[in-house]
Amino acid sequence: MKHLRLFVAMIAASFLTSPAAAYWDYGHQTVAAIAWANITPHARAEIRRILRAQGELDTPSCPVRTIEEASVWPDCVKPLKDGNGKSRFGYAYSWHYQNVDICQPFRLPPACDSGDCVSAQIPRQLAILKDKRASDKDRVMALAFLVHFVGDLHQPLHAGDKGDKGGNDTHVDYGDYATARLNLHSIWDGLLAERAISTPPKLVRAYPAAERRREAAGGVMAWSRENWAVAKRAYAAAMGGNPCQPTPAHMTMDDAAIRAMAPVEREQVKRGGLRLAKLLNQAFRG
Protein backbone atom coordinates (compact mmCIF):
# COMPACT_ATOMS: atom_id res chain seq x y z
CA MET A 1 0.00 0.00 0.00
CA LYS A 2 2.81 2.41 0.89
CA HIS A 3 4.52 1.58 -2.42
CA LEU A 4 1.32 2.25 -4.37
CA ARG A 5 0.78 5.62 -2.66
CA LEU A 6 4.31 6.60 -3.59
CA PHE A 7 3.66 5.48 -7.18
CA VAL A 8 0.49 7.61 -7.33
CA ALA A 9 2.36 10.63 -6.00
CA MET A 10 5.17 10.22 -8.51
CA ILE A 11 2.82 9.93 -11.46
CA ALA A 12 0.70 12.85 -10.32
CA ALA A 13 3.75 15.06 -9.92
CA SER A 14 4.83 14.31 -13.48
CA PHE A 15 1.68 15.39 -15.31
CA LEU A 16 0.36 18.57 -13.83
CA THR A 17 0.93 21.78 -15.56
CA SER A 18 0.42 21.87 -19.27
CA PRO A 19 -1.90 20.68 -22.00
CA ALA A 20 1.24 19.58 -23.82
CA ALA A 21 2.17 17.12 -21.09
CA ALA A 22 1.75 13.86 -22.91
CA TYR A 23 1.11 10.22 -22.22
CA TRP A 24 3.19 8.76 -19.49
CA ASP A 25 6.06 6.90 -21.19
CA TYR A 26 4.27 3.56 -20.82
CA GLY A 27 1.42 4.74 -23.02
CA HIS A 28 3.63 6.14 -25.79
CA GLN A 29 5.97 3.18 -25.76
CA THR A 30 3.07 0.74 -25.94
CA VAL A 31 1.56 2.55 -28.94
CA ALA A 32 4.98 2.37 -30.62
CA ALA A 33 5.46 -1.31 -29.76
CA ILE A 34 2.05 -2.23 -31.15
CA ALA A 35 2.90 -0.42 -34.36
CA TRP A 36 6.28 -2.17 -34.58
CA ALA A 37 4.58 -5.56 -34.24
CA ASN A 38 2.19 -4.75 -37.10
CA ILE A 39 4.31 -3.08 -39.77
CA THR A 40 5.92 -4.77 -42.75
CA PRO A 41 9.48 -6.12 -42.65
CA HIS A 42 10.39 -3.48 -45.22
CA ALA A 43 9.10 -0.69 -42.97
CA ARG A 44 11.04 -2.10 -40.01
CA ALA A 45 14.24 -2.16 -42.05
CA GLU A 46 13.73 1.44 -43.20
CA ILE A 47 13.02 2.62 -39.66
CA ARG A 48 16.16 0.91 -38.36
CA ARG A 49 18.17 2.64 -41.07
CA ILE A 50 16.69 6.07 -40.26
CA LEU A 51 17.27 5.59 -36.54
CA ARG A 52 20.99 5.23 -37.20
CA ALA A 53 20.98 9.01 -37.81
CA GLN A 54 19.68 9.78 -34.32
CA GLY A 55 23.05 11.23 -33.29
CA GLU A 56 22.45 14.15 -35.67
CA LEU A 57 19.67 15.37 -33.38
CA ASP A 58 22.35 16.26 -30.81
CA THR A 59 20.14 15.22 -27.89
CA PRO A 60 22.31 12.65 -26.08
CA SER A 61 20.16 12.79 -22.97
CA CYS A 62 17.17 11.91 -25.15
CA PRO A 63 18.31 9.09 -27.45
CA VAL A 64 16.28 7.76 -30.39
CA ARG A 65 17.80 4.31 -30.88
CA THR A 66 14.49 2.42 -31.06
CA ILE A 67 10.92 3.21 -31.99
CA GLU A 68 10.03 3.12 -28.28
CA GLU A 69 12.66 5.76 -27.53
CA ALA A 70 11.42 7.77 -30.51
CA SER A 71 7.94 7.71 -29.00
CA VAL A 72 9.03 9.71 -25.93
CA TRP A 73 11.69 11.92 -27.53
CA PRO A 74 9.36 14.91 -28.16
CA ASP A 75 8.57 15.08 -24.45
CA CYS A 76 12.12 14.34 -23.34
CA VAL A 77 13.55 17.30 -25.28
CA LYS A 78 11.12 19.91 -23.91
CA PRO A 79 13.50 21.12 -21.18
CA LEU A 80 16.57 21.32 -23.45
CA LYS A 81 18.08 24.78 -23.90
CA ASP A 82 20.39 26.27 -26.50
CA GLY A 83 23.58 28.17 -25.70
CA ASN A 84 21.55 31.32 -24.99
CA GLY A 85 19.28 29.61 -22.50
CA LYS A 86 16.34 29.50 -24.89
CA SER A 87 14.22 26.42 -25.48
CA ARG A 88 15.55 24.41 -28.42
CA PHE A 89 12.18 22.84 -29.19
CA GLY A 90 9.74 25.43 -27.85
CA TYR A 91 8.32 25.88 -31.34
CA ALA A 92 6.73 22.42 -31.04
CA TYR A 93 4.99 23.02 -27.71
CA SER A 94 1.50 23.39 -29.17
CA TRP A 95 1.91 20.48 -31.60
CA HIS A 96 1.01 17.91 -28.94
CA TYR A 97 -2.70 18.69 -28.51
CA GLN A 98 -5.80 20.45 -29.79
CA ASN A 99 -8.25 22.04 -27.39
CA VAL A 100 -11.57 21.23 -29.05
CA ASP A 101 -14.54 22.17 -26.86
CA ILE A 102 -16.44 19.00 -25.96
CA CYS A 103 -19.61 21.03 -25.32
CA GLN A 104 -19.75 22.59 -28.78
CA PRO A 105 -20.08 21.01 -32.22
CA PHE A 106 -16.80 19.46 -33.32
CA ARG A 107 -14.50 21.99 -34.97
CA LEU A 108 -10.74 22.01 -35.00
CA PRO A 109 -9.23 25.16 -33.49
CA PRO A 110 -7.88 27.94 -35.69
CA ALA A 111 -4.37 26.99 -34.55
CA CYS A 112 -4.64 23.90 -36.74
CA ASP A 113 -4.78 26.10 -39.83
CA SER A 114 -1.15 27.07 -39.28
CA GLY A 115 -0.06 23.59 -38.24
CA ASP A 116 0.04 24.32 -34.51
CA CYS A 117 -1.99 21.34 -33.33
CA VAL A 118 -1.57 17.61 -33.20
CA SER A 119 -3.88 16.65 -36.06
CA ALA A 120 -2.15 19.09 -38.41
CA GLN A 121 1.31 17.84 -37.47
CA ILE A 122 0.63 14.14 -38.09
CA PRO A 123 0.32 14.51 -41.88
CA ARG A 124 3.13 17.09 -41.96
CA GLN A 125 5.57 14.80 -40.19
CA LEU A 126 4.43 11.85 -42.31
CA ALA A 127 5.20 13.84 -45.46
CA ILE A 128 8.74 14.59 -44.25
CA LEU A 129 9.26 10.95 -43.34
CA LYS A 130 8.15 9.87 -46.83
CA ASP A 131 10.45 12.36 -48.57
CA LYS A 132 13.64 10.54 -49.55
CA ARG A 133 15.20 13.88 -50.45
CA ALA A 134 14.87 15.12 -46.86
CA SER A 135 17.99 15.00 -44.70
CA ASP A 136 18.60 12.10 -42.35
CA LYS A 137 18.24 14.49 -39.41
CA ASP A 138 14.88 15.75 -40.63
CA ARG A 139 13.59 12.23 -41.24
CA VAL A 140 14.59 10.84 -37.85
CA MET A 141 13.04 13.88 -36.17
CA ALA A 142 9.88 13.44 -38.25
CA LEU A 143 9.74 9.78 -37.25
CA ALA A 144 9.94 10.69 -33.56
CA PHE A 145 7.30 13.40 -33.89
CA LEU A 146 4.96 11.16 -35.89
CA VAL A 147 5.18 8.24 -33.47
CA HIS A 148 4.63 10.56 -30.52
CA PHE A 149 1.81 12.60 -31.99
CA VAL A 150 -0.27 9.59 -33.00
CA GLY A 151 -0.01 8.53 -29.37
CA ASP A 152 -0.97 12.01 -28.19
CA LEU A 153 -4.04 12.17 -30.41
CA HIS A 154 -5.33 8.93 -28.89
CA GLN A 155 -5.04 10.25 -25.34
CA PRO A 156 -8.53 11.81 -25.40
CA LEU A 157 -7.60 14.78 -23.20
CA HIS A 158 -5.31 15.89 -26.05
CA ALA A 159 -8.24 15.78 -28.49
CA GLY A 160 -10.98 17.50 -26.49
CA ASP A 161 -11.29 19.72 -23.47
CA LYS A 162 -13.58 21.99 -21.51
CA GLY A 163 -11.59 25.18 -21.24
CA ASP A 164 -9.36 23.56 -18.63
CA LYS A 165 -6.17 22.77 -20.57
CA GLY A 166 -7.24 19.26 -21.42
CA GLY A 167 -8.27 18.43 -17.86
CA ASN A 168 -5.05 19.75 -16.30
CA ASP A 169 -7.03 22.35 -14.33
CA THR A 170 -9.66 19.82 -13.21
CA HIS A 171 -8.89 18.26 -9.81
CA VAL A 172 -9.96 14.61 -9.71
CA ASP A 173 -9.21 11.91 -7.14
CA TYR A 174 -8.56 8.41 -8.42
CA GLY A 175 -10.62 5.93 -6.45
CA ASP A 176 -9.36 5.95 -2.86
CA TYR A 177 -6.23 7.88 -3.77
CA ALA A 178 -6.74 11.55 -3.05
CA THR A 179 -4.09 14.19 -3.62
CA ALA A 180 -4.22 17.76 -4.82
CA ARG A 181 -1.61 16.80 -7.39
CA LEU A 182 -3.98 14.63 -9.42
CA ASN A 183 -6.11 15.97 -12.25
CA LEU A 184 -8.18 14.45 -15.04
CA HIS A 185 -5.34 14.74 -17.55
CA SER A 186 -2.75 13.10 -15.33
CA ILE A 187 -5.10 10.21 -14.57
CA TRP A 188 -5.55 9.40 -18.26
CA ASP A 189 -1.83 9.93 -18.91
CA GLY A 190 -0.66 7.67 -16.14
CA LEU A 191 -2.76 5.81 -13.63
CA LEU A 192 -5.60 4.75 -15.88
CA ALA A 193 -3.18 4.04 -18.74
CA GLU A 194 -1.12 1.76 -16.51
CA ARG A 195 -4.21 -0.21 -15.49
CA ALA A 196 -5.52 -0.40 -19.05
CA ILE A 197 -2.25 -1.51 -20.64
CA SER A 198 -1.22 -3.99 -17.96
CA THR A 199 -4.57 -5.81 -17.90
CA PRO A 200 -4.38 -9.12 -19.86
CA PRO A 201 -4.38 -10.12 -22.64
CA LYS A 202 -1.23 -8.48 -23.98
CA LEU A 203 -1.84 -5.44 -26.15
CA VAL A 204 1.50 -5.68 -27.91
CA ARG A 205 1.10 -8.41 -30.50
CA ALA A 206 0.52 -8.92 -34.21
CA TYR A 207 -3.17 -8.42 -34.96
CA PRO A 208 -5.16 -10.16 -37.72
CA ALA A 209 -5.32 -8.23 -40.98
CA ALA A 210 -9.09 -7.75 -40.70
CA GLU A 211 -8.75 -6.20 -37.25
CA ARG A 212 -5.94 -3.95 -38.40
CA ARG A 213 -8.06 -2.70 -41.29
CA ARG A 214 -11.09 -2.13 -39.08
CA GLU A 215 -9.27 -0.28 -36.32
CA ALA A 216 -7.11 1.80 -38.68
CA ALA A 217 -9.92 2.83 -41.02
CA GLY A 218 -10.31 6.51 -41.82
CA GLY A 219 -7.79 9.30 -41.44
CA VAL A 220 -6.63 11.99 -39.07
CA MET A 221 -9.80 14.07 -39.22
CA ALA A 222 -12.01 11.08 -38.43
CA TRP A 223 -9.65 10.02 -35.64
CA SER A 224 -9.73 13.55 -34.20
CA ARG A 225 -13.52 13.55 -34.10
CA GLU A 226 -13.58 10.08 -32.56
CA ASN A 227 -11.09 10.98 -29.83
CA TRP A 228 -12.94 14.23 -29.10
CA ALA A 229 -16.04 12.09 -28.50
CA VAL A 230 -14.03 9.86 -26.14
CA ALA A 231 -12.96 13.00 -24.27
CA LYS A 232 -16.63 13.68 -23.55
CA ARG A 233 -16.86 10.24 -21.97
CA ALA A 234 -13.75 10.94 -19.90
CA TYR A 235 -15.29 14.09 -18.44
CA ALA A 236 -18.66 12.40 -17.94
CA ALA A 237 -17.05 9.54 -15.99
CA ALA A 238 -15.33 11.97 -13.63
CA MET A 239 -18.41 14.15 -13.24
CA GLY A 240 -20.87 11.30 -12.76
CA GLY A 241 -23.15 12.38 -15.58
CA ASN A 242 -23.48 15.30 -17.97
CA PRO A 243 -19.96 16.39 -18.99
CA CYS A 244 -21.20 19.86 -19.93
CA GLN A 245 -22.64 20.79 -16.56
CA PRO A 246 -20.56 23.25 -14.52
CA THR A 247 -17.35 21.55 -13.44
CA PRO A 248 -17.15 20.97 -9.67
CA ALA A 249 -14.05 22.18 -7.88
CA HIS A 250 -13.30 18.64 -6.75
CA MET A 251 -14.33 15.34 -8.35
CA THR A 252 -13.64 11.64 -7.88
CA MET A 253 -13.32 8.87 -10.41
CA ASP A 254 -14.83 6.13 -8.29
CA ASP A 255 -14.15 2.43 -8.70
CA ALA A 256 -17.12 1.99 -11.03
CA ALA A 257 -15.89 4.79 -13.29
CA ILE A 258 -12.36 3.37 -13.31
CA ARG A 259 -13.65 -0.08 -14.25
CA ALA A 260 -15.73 1.46 -17.04
CA MET A 261 -13.00 3.69 -18.46
CA ALA A 262 -10.00 1.34 -18.31
CA PRO A 263 -11.25 -0.71 -21.32
CA VAL A 264 -11.91 2.56 -23.16
CA GLU A 265 -8.32 3.68 -22.66
CA ARG A 266 -7.09 0.22 -23.58
CA GLU A 267 -8.93 0.51 -26.89
CA GLN A 268 -7.42 3.97 -27.41
CA VAL A 269 -3.89 2.59 -27.05
CA LYS A 270 -4.60 -0.30 -29.43
CA ARG A 271 -6.14 2.01 -32.02
CA GLY A 272 -3.21 4.39 -31.73
CA GLY A 273 -0.76 1.55 -32.34
CA LEU A 274 -2.58 0.09 -35.31
CA ARG A 275 -3.16 3.50 -36.88
CA LEU A 276 0.49 4.35 -36.43
CA ALA A 277 1.34 1.05 -38.14
CA LYS A 278 -0.86 2.06 -41.06
CA LEU A 279 0.95 5.40 -41.42
CA LEU A 280 4.41 3.87 -41.13
CA ASN A 281 3.56 1.30 -43.80
CA GLN A 282 2.38 4.16 -46.01
CA ALA A 283 5.65 6.01 -45.41
CA PHE A 284 7.78 3.03 -46.43
CA ARG A 285 5.92 1.29 -49.19
CA GLY A 286 8.36 -0.85 -51.10
Image (cartoon, rainbow, N blue to C red):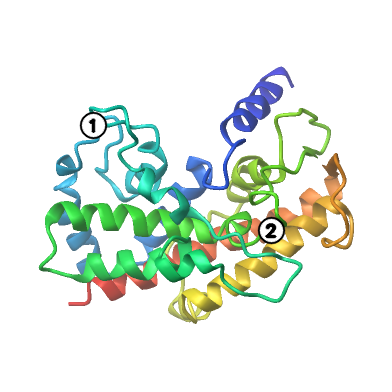
Q: What residue type is labelled 1?
A: Pro
In space, the residues marked 1 and 2 are separated at their CA atoms by: 36 Å
SS of the residue under disc 1? loop
From what the image shows, is residue 32 above or below residue 171?
below
* Res 109 quadrant in image: bottom right
**Residue placed furthest toward the top:** 2
The answer to whether mark 1 and mark 2 are in CB contact below 8 A is no
* Res 276 quadrant in image: bottom left
Q: Which mark is residue 263?
A: 2
Residue 191, image x, y percentages: 65, 40
Instruction: Name which of mark 1 and mark 2 comes first in the sequence.
Output: 1
Q: Nearer the viewer, residue 93 or 35?
A: 93
Residue 271, image x, y percentages: 53, 66
Circle 1 crowding by C-alpha within 10 Å: few under 14, some 14–19, many from 20? few
SS of the residue under disc 2? helix
The quadrant of the picture occupied by the N terminus is top right
From what the image shows, is residue 133 above or below residue 141?
below
Q: Which of 156 and 167 is in front in this view?
A: 167
Residue for badge 1: 60
The quadrant of the picture occupied by the C terminus is bottom left
Circle 2 crowding by C-alpha within 10 Å: few under 14, some 14–19, many from 20? some
From what the image shows, is residue 87 above or below residue 157?
above
Q: Nearer the viewer, residue 206 or 276?
A: 276
Side of 160 relative to 39 (left or right): right
Q: What residue type is labelled 2?
A: Pro
What residue lies at 74% left-to-right and 56% top-to-bottom?
261
Side of 252 relative to 50 (left or right): right
